[in-house]
Image (cartoon, coloured by chain):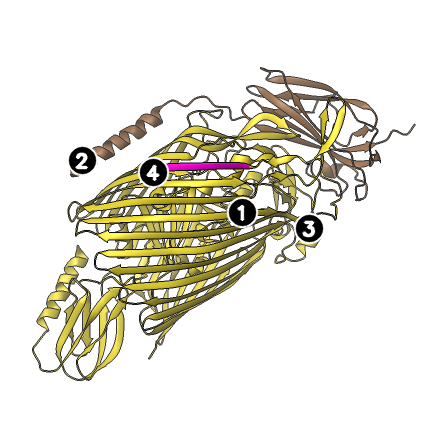
Chain colours: A yellow, B brown
Amino acid sequence: MIRFFMLLVCMSVIHVSLHSQVGYQLSGTVKTEDNSPLTGAVIYLYPIEKGSITDASGKFSLSHLPAGQYRIEVSFIGYKTFTDTISIKGDQTFNIQLEVSSLSLQEVVVKDNYAEQRKREESLNIEVVNDDYLKMNMGGSLMNSLERLPGVSTIDIGSGQSKPVIRGLGFNRVVVVENNIKHEAQQWGADHGLEIDQFAVENIEVIKGPASLMYGSDAIGGIINIKNNKIPTPNTLRGNVDIIGKSNNSLIGSSLSLTGRKSWLHASLRATVLSYGDYRVPADSVVIFPDSYSYKVNLHNKQMRNTAGYEHNYHGTIGIVKDHFQSRIMASQINSKGGFFANAHGLEPRQVDSELHDQSSRDILLPYYQVSHFKIANKTKWRKDQLEIQFDGGFQRNFRQEWSQYSSHGYMPPVFPDTLPFSSELEREFKKDYYSANLNVKYTVNDQLTLTTGLNTEYHINDIDGRGFIIPAYKRSNIGAFLLLKYALSDESALQAGVRYDYGHISIDQYKDWYLSPVIEGNDTTYHYLERASETERDFSNFSWSAGYNYNPSNWIFKVNAGKSFRMPTAQELAANGINYHYFRYEVGDADLSPEVSWQLDAGVEYAEPLFAVGASPFLNYFSNYIYLNPTSEFNQGYQVFYYNQSRVLRYGGEIHAHYQLFNALTLGIIGEYVYSRQLSGEKEGYTLPFSPPASAIINLKYRKDILGFAQNAYFSVDYRLTAAQNEVVPPEDPTPGYTLVNIGLGGDIRFKSQTLSVNMQVQNLFNKAYLNHTSYYRLMSIPEQGRNIVLNVSIPFSTHLK
Amino acid sequence: MKIIIFKCIIIFAAIMVLFSCDSDTEIDKEKPVIHTDFINAFPTSCETIYFGETFNLRALFSDNAELGAYSIEIHNNFDHHSHGHNIEACDLAPKKEPVNPFVFLEDYDIPEGQNEYEVNLPISIPSENGEGLFDEGDYHFQIYLTDKEGWSTPLGLSVKMLYRED
């Protein structure tokens, strides 16, 4: 309201200052990065203080201008103010593109107009953050940095790897989308991270709720939608140098980006290098599996032996922007290597040569993983009048290797034979190629009705190698089509509804052990290469839908959405039949599993005033056939047997947030999240689901000043995080005690002459507390999380105009 | 319109309250226990097992509800990989390369409906296999126990496996 009022004031001021004068005319159009016209943008010329406002098609004109040098300033709320010098010698046109402002999303309150707008138009609950937010909250990985958002948690391994969990659902139940293309890797693994460079992220939307409608299979829990496809302002060259350091694992790193645009052609480059040592826990020793093996490991300098790693990431983009057409090609290569805690092999504690490991905290010895993720994608958009057609196509190759010392288990030969086609130390290798092509057609019928229809196709080829077997090789193809309708009932309310149909086929290869096992029948013992996955072919189809309603009267946002989404079973859920020597259990798949189907009801209510805001987003979710790896009392070949079962599951919960501006610059905020899950049928009726995040809350106090001494946008913030105990467990999980943590953050922009430095500092786990995170991989072995960690991030932007 | 929204939210809240009031079914959250702390327990840590002989596994299993099954696994520890807790207490022979190590993997049932079970199981260790005599030395003797609900408990013991010298 206040902003609108200010805009009115601006407009009247500008109106008054327009006088008639003979001279030249300056006209042009103001557009957003994706070329849609901006209505109501303010154009102002200095020093004559003449201005104008763009009309419905983004056009403006200023007449009677005397020849000369002017400074032009174009501004619009939610966008970065554009300034430039122009010399007027005759009538001329000047077109401007405004970038979405990187005004940060405040701790609890959404200050960014773009985020606000997305919240208002989306009937599912959504969190929107930008790169500034990531810098203020930078964790060991992208997902760690987002963990603070209500409803978002992570499954972590070590200090640099984590994967997303939305309201308790993770793995293959959350889809990560980068620039409209699904990020495809080995999502099923608890000890695999997400291969995304967090420095390259410009904007992220977290959609909480069933999103199969737009993205097909797997989007049951929600979507992490990553965008790094801003179109640069014409005739500029800009760049950024980021330098980062972390005390806990002695991380040093930097990221350099360069983005330029010459009229219709633009290009960008980015390189990120990170290197870190073993991370520290607040303990001199850890006891792995305290109530069974009770294996004590003494730590050298409180360091988790062999958890060092590095990341080398490269990105490149080239694109064209025309009036009705834009196209770009984006390529990226993410490389990372990191050690696994040496005193455990999978979930088995091991004694190692401590002296060798403790020589250096930065070396990466066995066991370690090495991942490279290559991605190339094209995005092409054509737009004319009411019609918009967009194509997104791409190829990805995820290549992951896990190396460890050979150790014979079960009937494996005591000494590794040299006749095998893979190295004795290659435990697992996964190579996944993923091709995808999506076509979207959007037709704006009138001011009220918009229709979007789309076709998504994808093809996966997953190959495996190495001595350890977890998932079989497979090929999978999917095709899906959807129709989505948005209807504005009034300026304040809108309906959206959509339907989708998917068809998928999976073809799983047979896998046999590379070693012989004895099979005893009667008195005869024969030796066989046992089959661990059988050749399996399955077809799946699913009809999904979603319907929602938003009502946004002045200070309120109300939303309600109902939807059905689904997930195709994975290869190991369908075909596994053997010992998983990572978890030391015998896993049995079921070739007859049906696609997992979930129904969800979501609601959202938010009330915001300039000084006060409060909101809640509850959900209710029902699975008719949740796929679950059920531990039984049976044994096979010495190991406990786990079957993939399906059971009915009920889940509900939600998030709340509120903030209140105590004084001018001081804001108090609270965020809380809670999820309850229960299996309603099957062998584990009455139990929860694995990896259920405990209830948690953050109480935040933030001091913020636009100008504080020599710093601009200065902030100081304290987070008091409370996490409840998780006593709702299902075998083989252990209950996890609750804990509280204090994190602080401070930063601001410092100006040296014409150069700005943006500095963000955090102290995570200020009191160096030893605690267990229920959803961390190392939690399974009772290993505490990282101790105190000071994170410093300095960002140096630079830019110049291209003549 | 506002009223409809409020109604929706109230219904929603009512459903949630309804479900949360539903009384929790009593579920088992306790793991079974392997006891080897009684006089006749065998093997215990650092015990010797002889090739070509039969010994009786003696242990006591218990669970708060109902026991499931158990398995026994024996594998060599010639590389001192040590995942038991009593490992430092035993005298380990120097590290060596396995040639023909002994491997034992067997699964056993526990009669239905037991919450306590005393194992007295004869286990015959062969004196050789097709490759000849087994490697003597340090071995791990692992017992895995489950209960009916799928909770499991491992117990790892360090033992010596030798040929008896007459």
Residue A572 can be seen, yes or no: yes
Q: What's the CA distance linking mark 4 and mark 1?
A: 26 Å
Q: Amino acid at mark 4?
A: Ser
Question: Residue A528, percent across and down?
Answer: 70, 34
Reply above or below: A479 against B156: below
Mark 3: which secondary structure? loop
Looking at the rendered structure, whether the residues under marks 1 and 2 are on a common chain is answered as no
Q: Residues within 10 Å of mark 1 (few under 14, many from 20)?
A: many
Q: Residue furthest left?
A: A20
Q: Which mark is residue A423?
A: 3
Along the horizontal axis of the image, is A786 left or right of A512? Answer: left
Looking at the rendered structure, whether the residues under marks 3 and 1 are on a common chain is answered as yes
The residue tagged 1 is A462
Mark 1: which secondary structure? strand
Mark 4: which secondary structure? strand
Foreground mark, 2 or 3? 3
- Dominant SS of magenta comes to strand
Q: Which mark is residue A544?
A: 4
Foreground mark, 2 or 4? 4
